[in-house]
Image (cartoon, grey):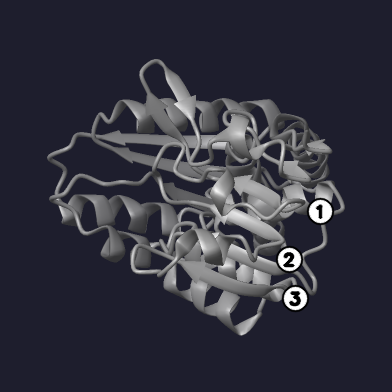
Amino acid sequence: MAEIIIDGKAVAARVRSEVAEEVAVLRGQGIEPGLAVILVGEDPASQSYVGMKERDCEEVGIRSFDTRLSADTSQADLEAIIDGFNADPAVHGILLQLPLPASLDAESAIARIAPEKDVDGFHPVSIGRLVRGLPSAHACTPEGVMELLRAYDIDPSGKRAVVIGRSVLVGKPMALLLIEANATVTVCHSRTQDLPGVCREADILVAAIGRPHMIDASYIKPGAVVIDVGINRVGDKLVGDVAYSEVEPLASAITPVPGGVGPMTRAVLLKNTVAAAESAGL
């Protein structure tokens, strides 16, 4: 049995509590942190997720500016709304919920967000600053993973880390954050040869591929830390990319799904929003 079952709910609750304290301080200085949330279309998963983010904002005292648009919204109309939030001093962070409908250009819309209001960490400037090792908002899910590692005193420095997945949302920024933490990082993907063998070299294994239960015991070095970023619906259950019951006995620490990385994504969004408000108030 794994020595540590990483409790993302508990760590996220601590982060939200810390954010609420910071919000109270800012309000005392006359600054009310504001987050603009833009949802295009009626994807049920996106609607649910945005609803949870809005409740999080209410819990910690962040003002939420909600904009919900129909799936046939034009690129020009979407970018005009983004421009409006860019110009609004009451808005410190802008969240554009992804994915967008296929008719819209997500890259153009993300680039339209003012870099200082990019609390999702997806803007080209934010990614570029991460590559350069400069301060910036970090993508929420990868930064949430780093928060979990810190919370459990798991130090990546000098360790072999393997990230399975190379998306710009998770895999690439995850690798960069681990490099910044002085890990030796390998990024794997669909063209990687002998994927299980590469993964067995990992002291820290991060699975972010979106394939339920793909990572079984054959991928795991005994004693590895296993971080499961995957959230997949199988029937009426949410499951990860990791075959938990097979892998958990081999791991020294592991995140469950649900209750592992998921809660941290929203917690880091709040943290990034407060940081943006603090910067705007300087």
Q: Is residue 151 visible?
A: yes
190 displayed left or right of 13: left
Within 10 Å of disc 3 (Cα), the crowding (few <14, some 14-19, many 20+) is some
Find the residue positioned furthest to the right. Answer: 153
* Residue assigned mark 3: 182
The residues bearing labels 1 and 3 have C-alpha atoms spaced at a distance of 14 Å
Q: Amino acid at mark 3?
A: Asn
Question: What secondary structure is marked by label 2?
Answer: loop
Q: Amino acid at mark 1?
A: Arg
27 displayed left or right of 74: right
x, y percentage for residue 191? Answer: 34, 68
**For marks 1 and 2 on the same chain, the one whose residue lies earlier in the sequence:** 1
| Vertical relation: 130 (above or below) 82 | below
Disc number at residue 150? Answer: 1
135 displayed left or right of 101: right
Q: Amino acid at mark 2?
A: Leu
Q: Quadrant of the N terminus?
A: top right
Q: Is residue 116 visible?
A: no
Disc number at residue 282? Answer: 2
x, y percentage for residue 251? Answer: 72, 45
The residues bearing labels 1 and 2 have C-alpha atoms spaced at a distance of 28 Å
